[in-house]
Image (cartoon, rainbow, N blue to C red):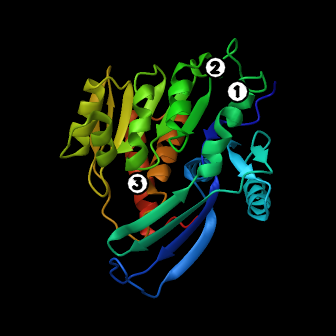
């Protein structure tokens, strides 16, 4: 089979509805601001970012056959993403994410990924039936895996022969879902991208900084980890090379949603381009900083 993509993005592809205001927000606040509706979700955010670095993503996700789903499929195709392997179900609505952001950062968010969860392992069919891989011929390329999948499915992926040879890059999709990734920590090809809080959930510890979090995750059995800490240092930890870190450039924060996905995608792209550990980490920090500053308006 002729390869048509550079990376598989598995997980949530949905509509992001984001409200942003420069006024302080509290429970019950009603403030003026701007509301945007854009394609989003962890898998989609990563796909959009890697495209900027001349990598072509293919999506493995669930998108409904409703009007919102048809519009989302059109958006994905228009952006150059391969949608051939997307699972479509007439019985499931297209997922969505709603967030409110204030000057202090994210105020609140709700992720409705019920259709992705309901689809289950149906979204992985191309990796099992020989289209992209199978148990006898495992997929050997880079996979960006979204923690929005169910706990059971993520645990299953950690043991599936079809994933055994993959360069598996994993995002937790929020602190509340971080513990779902525990079975993937010891996968020999897995790199986990988490923030300091998520690292704490994965190890039942509290860390003061990204370096300590990366060190703690490796001690807990993770193969490799990338840990971010907002506008502070980010760290890269692995068994062979220990832990390294680099600071985040100082910028004015104008948006938060998607920053972690942008960091992850930029880091993957840098490593695929042949950059070493430190250079890739610096590149990811700089790219994410530009994103949150609003300089990188995608």
Q: Position of residue 179 (x, y in %)?
A: 38, 38
Q: Residues within 10 Å of mark 1 (few under 14, many from 20)?
A: some
Compared across the picture, whether 93 is left or right of 280 comes to: right
Q: Quadrant of the N terminus?
A: top right
Q: Residues within 10 Å of mark 2 (few under 14, many from 20)?
A: many
Mark 2 falls on what kind of element? helix
Work out whether residue 241 or residue 93 is closer to the camera in this orientation and state it: 93
Asked if residue 228 can be seen in this view, the reply is no
Q: Position of residue 120 (x, y in %)?
A: 64, 37
Q: Position of residue 139 (x, y in %)?
A: 65, 22
Mark drawn on residue 83 = none
Residue under label 3, please give it.
286
Q: Are marks 2 and 1 in contact (CB under 8 Å)?
A: yes
Compared across the picture, whether 73 is left or right of 11 comes to: right
Marked residue nearer the N-terminal end (3 or 2): 2
Q: Distance of mark 3 from mark 2, alpha carbons?
A: 34 Å
Mark drawn on residue 162 = 2
Closer mark to the observer between disc 3 and disc 1:
1
**Residue found 73% across the figure and 55% down from its top:** 76
Q: Position of residue 107 (x, y in %)?
A: 38, 69
Q: Distance of mark 2 from mark 1, alpha carbons?
A: 7 Å
Residue under label 1, please give it.
127
Q: Give the vertical position of 7 relative to 296 (above or below).
A: above
**Residue found 50% across the figure and 41% down from its top:** 147
């Amino acid at each position: 089979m002729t390869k048509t993509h550079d990376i598989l993005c598995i997980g949530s592809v949905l509509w992001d509805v984001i409200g942003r205001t420069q006024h302080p927000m509290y429970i019950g606040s009603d403030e003026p601001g701007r509301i945007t509706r854009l394609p989003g979700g962890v898998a989609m955010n990563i796909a959009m970012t890697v495209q900027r670095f001349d990598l072509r993503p293919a999506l493995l996700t669930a998108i409904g056959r409703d009007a919102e789903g048809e519009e989302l499929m059109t958006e994905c195709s228009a952006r150059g993403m391969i949608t051939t392997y997307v699972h479509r179900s007439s019985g499931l609505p297209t997922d969505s994410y709603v967030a409110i952001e204030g000057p202090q950062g994210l105020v609140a968010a709700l992720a409705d990924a019920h259709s992705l969860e309901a689809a289950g392992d149906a979204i992985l069919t191309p990796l099992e039936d020989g289209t992209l891989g199978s148990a006898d011929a495992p997929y050997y390329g880079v996979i960006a895996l979204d923690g929005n999948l169910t706990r059971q499915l993520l645990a299953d992926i950690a043991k599936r022969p079809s994933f055994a040879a993959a360069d598996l890059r994993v995002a937790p999709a929020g602190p509340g879902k971080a513990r779902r990734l525990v079975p993937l920590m010891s996968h020999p090809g897995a790199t986990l991208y988490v923030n300091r809080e998520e690292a704490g959930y994965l190890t039942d510890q509290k860390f003061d900084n990204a370096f300590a979090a990366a060190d703690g995750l490796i001690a807990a059995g993770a193969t490799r980890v990338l840990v971010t800490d907002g506008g502070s240092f980010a760290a890269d930890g692995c068994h062979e090379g220990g832990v390294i870190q680099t600071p985040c450039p100082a910028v004015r924060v104008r948006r938060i949603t998607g920053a972690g996905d942008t960091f992850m995608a930029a880091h993957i792209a840098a490593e695929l381009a042949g950059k070493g550990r430190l250079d890739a980490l610096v590149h990811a920090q700089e790219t994410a900083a530009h994103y949150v500053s609003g300089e990188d308006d995608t």
